[in-house]
Amino acid sequence: MEHGLHSEVTAAEFGVALLMLTAIVIYMNASVVSGKRNRKWPLYRIFLWILGVLAIGAVCIGPLASRAHSDFTVHMFNHLLIGMLAPLLMVLSSPVALLLRSLSVASARKVAGILKSRLVYFMGHPITAAILNTGGLFVLYTTDLYFLMHDYFLLYVLVHFHLFAAGYLFTASIIYIDPVAHRVGFLYRAIVLVTALAGHGLLAKLIYADPPETVLKSQAEAGSMLMYYGGDAIDAVLIIVFCYQWFISARPRQTVPEGGFK
């Protein structure tokens, strides 16, 4: 049985490594294609994409992934990587804009049509994304889900996929790096962002006071503090980008004086 589980995990790690390599190759290939058709794709965006993929890989493969099963502090570090840092890095790498630029006109129009659909609007709305993101964390740490996911491999994979997907949706719904068909106002997004950050901080305090079953008190305290302060550090970057976009949007437009510049 143990041998079967070990084989299952090894096969999954190989699959994740293959997906990581594929994601990097596809992104870099798209940047090359985009560079030939349009202007050169920024190198820093490629760098951010690779860092985001590697952050996911660190959670799924290697010593961090192994220790997270028995050490709640390591688990919480992985939570920050896959649920907050990797989504932020990958949103900043603007993959949707790159996709649209690298596709043919006909294909790009089809993708643009999908982006305008009601489903994408609903899933990408800040409130929906915040509920999936912060609400999902409450379900994970205040129910038996945290305990069960370490006993069922498929559940473990689904939880981590949700952490990343919800984190990506939430980040993308707050800062508009990629093209957005249905924009939500800055004030509206600011209220959702502040509420979600408060919820994240509240959950960290709840874990500190009442840790999940089977988690040692010392690990819960260390993990919850890491969640609280580590989350703040990543959120600070999100807030800076959001405020910068708001500032750019709100600043007065420069007008050309009569007779032009002298």
Image (tube, rainbow, N blue to C red):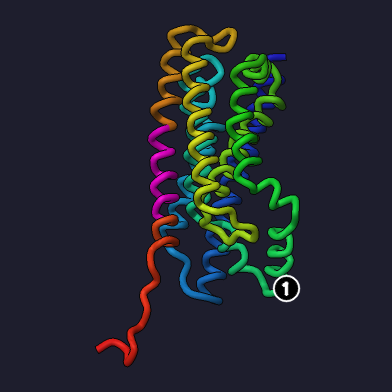
Q: Furthest-left residue in view?
A: 262
Instruction: Pinpoint residue 107: horizontal percent, then vertical percent.
Output: 71, 69
> On the rendered image, what quadrant is the C terminus found in?
bottom left
Question: Does the stretch in magenta take in 32?
Answer: no
Q: Main secondary structure of the magenta part?
A: helix
Question: Element at badge 1?
Answer: helix
The magenta stretch is 232-244
- Mark 1 = which residue? 106
Residue at 53 percent across and 38 percent down: it is 56
In the image, is residue 46 above or below residue 191?
Answer: below
Q: Furthest-bottom residue in view?
A: 259
The amino acid type of the residue labelled 1 equals Ala
Residue at 59 percent across and 51 percent down: it is 23
Tell me if I can see residue 207 in this picture.
Answer: yes
Residue at 35 percent across and 83 percent down: it is 256
Instruction: Pinpoint residue 237: horizontal percent, then vertical percent.
Output: 40, 44
Instruction: Pinpoint residue 257: horizontal percent, then vertical percent.
Output: 33, 85
Residue 64 in the figure: left or right of residue 240: right
Residue 46 in the figure: left or right of residue 18: left
In the image, is residue 15 above or below residue 68?
Answer: below
Say which of 240 and 30 sits in front. 240
Q: Tally the marks.
A: 1
